[in-house]
Amino acid sequence: MKKLYNIVGTKLLVILIVGFGFILGPSITAQMSLTQDNIMSKKNVHLVENISPSVYDLLIIAPQKFVNALQPLIIHKNNVGIRTRLVTLDEVYHQMFWQGRDQQEKIKYFIKTAKEAWGITYVMLVGDFQTIPIRYVYNADNNTGWNEPCFISELYYADLYDKNGDFSSWDTSNNGIYGEWYGDTAKDPDIDLYPDVYVGRLACRNIAEVKDMVRKIIRYETTTYGQEWFHQIVVAGGDTYPASENPNWTAYEGEENTLHVLENMSGFEPTKLWTSDGTFTGPKDMIRAVRKGCGFFYLDGHANAFSWSTHPPNDAHTWINGLNTINMDLLRNKQMFPICVVGGCHNMEFDVTPQTIIKGLLEEGLRYFSIKAVPFGSFWKYTWIPECWGWKLTRMSSGGSIATIGCTGLGMTKEDKLSFSGAGDYLEPTFFHEYGVNGTTILGRVWGNTITDYLNHYPINWQTPAAKDSAIDAKTVQQWALLGDPSLKIGGYPPS
């Protein structure tokens, strides 16, 4: 009888495997079967790169409604040697039917499967937060006093493996709360955080925005090469933390960080917009500089989802305003699209929506009608606006950037750390070092290698209290998001 059970069980297992193969589809399943032995033997996540030969370079995940609008981009990418595969969200959820606790985890499992079966390097998510779901990470920074319990992390989709080469859920406590770091130690410890693929998002809300972004990317990659305007860089900053607030804040931090950036960008002609010398007095200075054309645009100061600004020297009560989601319409830099890196809070908080105002009123009641209450809660972070600063700048059809990188939550700086080093003050200049010194010219690789460099310099100690240095280091990379094409060739391709 035991032998009969074994025979029946074996047949059932074969039937299940064959049936599951039909669910997955031949393109992925066939290649997965060739790599399973290799996958099981991996002891180090960084060896996973060599699991299988590369079939595709770029994986695009998008809803069915965007498929036709994305076809010109797929053709273009294949023509320039970026082998591209588009998979719809419905296909992702169907093929990962048996894996993943929620939609986010199913998408992440699919990315892992595609990496192992197809050898993908880049992942482009096309859709806003309501279309392609986002993962919120609960790494609390309660020492700031701003009470931000969670924030968006796109790195979640890029960090596929733990240190043993197994799938990384970012929820080691298995309670449905991701990246949880409260109290004396992290509740979800030992997350690897190193990106295994390079992820960017086009946070498009409709087909028109998809078409605009497709046109921008194709035009950038086919016309930018050799153009004089590309070799310009615009930087902006001021006294981010005036010494009047803290005697240890002696430098003009924003201006200092712009200098660190420029040190890495030899061969680029700089335009410095500083509050200390009067070259930056308001948004008109920034608009005028970017209109002339630049390959890179770096800002370091204070921000929210709506605007960016900074202080003049030693004056914490005065604000020098820069771009916001209204006046950036005046940029009109035509087809001279820079890559923008922005230092500040919430510039990339792309889950904003006007519906938040209704939610806020319901939750907070008449408190919002008090002028004194405006800085609190959702109003303070401008989460009730139609779109965030970073996405508005990126998706503009007549100007703006070709891609924007910044913080989805409260931007952390060295002033937030006991060690008084690292955070955005290290991360952002490293991005320019990766491009300008190391010579990495694919945008997603620059983003990913910058995160890797940061983690190598500031390794995470998960056994330390929340809101202390290691938790801040983890948040620094977790919230650093790329809105744009991760396979973008910086500076474009030379004419064929």
Image: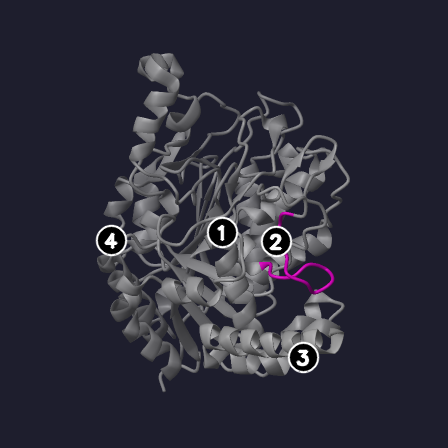
Name the quadrant of the C terminus. Answer: bottom left
User: What residue is pinned by disc 4?
Assistant: 332
Q: Is residue 16 visible?
A: yes
Point out the tag, 2 or 3, that comes first from the N-terminus.
Answer: 3
- The residue type indicated by label 4 comes to Arg
Point out the tag, 4 or 2, that comes first from the N-terminus.
Answer: 2
Q: Which residues are magenta?
A: 159-171
Name the quadrant of the N terminus. Answer: bottom right
Q: Looking at the image, do the residues carrying marks 3 and 1 touch, with CB atoms under 8 Å apart?
A: no
Q: Residues within 10 Å of mark 2 (few under 14, many from 20)?
A: many
How far apart in space, not on screen, are marks 2 and 1 (Cα)?
A: 11 Å
Q: Secondary structure at mark 2?
A: loop
Which marked residue is nearer to the observer: mark 2 or mark 3?
Answer: 3
User: What residue is pinned by disc 2?
Assistant: 169
Q: Secondary structure at mark 4?
A: loop
Quadrant of residue 229 within the rendered picture: bottom left
User: What residue is pinned by disc 3?
Assistant: 7
User: What residue is pinned by disc 1?
Assistant: 102
Image height check: is 445 above or below 379? below
Q: Label for residue 397? A: none
Q: Is residue 315 left or right of residue 182?
A: left
